[in-house]
Image: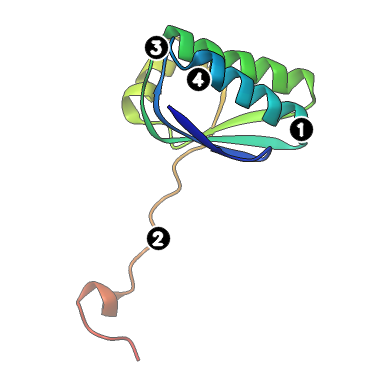
């Protein structure tokens, strides 16, 4: 598991599980305690999480709430999104909707140059 970023936005990659939970918890708590406003947690590169990893996310969510902040999940992979829905945690956590892809200009889509 790896986490990079600052007190406003963190990107999590790899596996968030029992082996990485303590390190992830420490990084998330530091980020929550060090900033203000939304803390965006980008999960685009997260391969998997187990119950312990999900518990770390929930703990960070609660800590952010106590600090007057909001934890926002971005780029939640589809299989993890389904788990959040099945457990109804999608009603508690703030999950950023994936923005629609920007339309490709017709000239670019057809392989011609726009001049």
26 versus 37 height, above or below? above
From the image, which quarter does the C terminus lie in? bottom left
From mark 2 to mark 1, how far is it between C-alphas?
Answer: 34 Å
Mark 4 vs 3: CB contact within 8 A: no
| Label 2 vs 1, first from the N-terminus | 1
Q: Which residue is drawn at 55% across and 20% down?
A: 23
Neighbourhood count class around disc 4 (C-alpha, 10 Å): few under 14, some 14–19, many 20 upward: some
Q: Which residue is drawn at 44% across and 17% down?
A: 84
* Direction bottom: furthest residue: 115
Nearest the viewer among 16 and 79 is: 16
> Is residue 88 among what the camera can see?
no
Labelled disc at residue 50: 3
Tell me where residue 72 appears, x and y as whole percent.
Answer: 59, 32
Labelled disc at residue 102: 2
Which of pointers 3 and 1 indicates the residue nearer the eye? 1
| Label 3 vs 2, first from the N-terminus | 3
Tell me where residue 48 appears, x and y as whole percent.
Answer: 35, 22
Determine which quarter of the picture holds residue 102. bottom left
| Label 4 vs 2, first from the N-terminus | 4
Residue named by callout 1 = 34
């Amino acid at each position: 598991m790896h986490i990079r970023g600052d007190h406003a936005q963190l990107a999590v990659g790899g596996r968030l599980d029992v082996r990485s939970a303590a390190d992830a918890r420490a990084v998330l708590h530091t980020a929550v305690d060090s900033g203000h406003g939304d803390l965006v947690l980008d999960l685009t590169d997260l391969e998997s999480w187990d119950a312990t990893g999900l518990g770390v996310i929930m703990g960070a969510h609660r800590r952010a709430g106590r600090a007057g902040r909001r934890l926002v999940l971005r780029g939640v992979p589809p299989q993890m999104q389904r788990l959040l829905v099945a457990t109804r945690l999608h009603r508690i956590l703030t999950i950023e909707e994936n923005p629609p892809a920007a339309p490709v200009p017709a000239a670019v889509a057809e392989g011609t140059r726009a001049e």
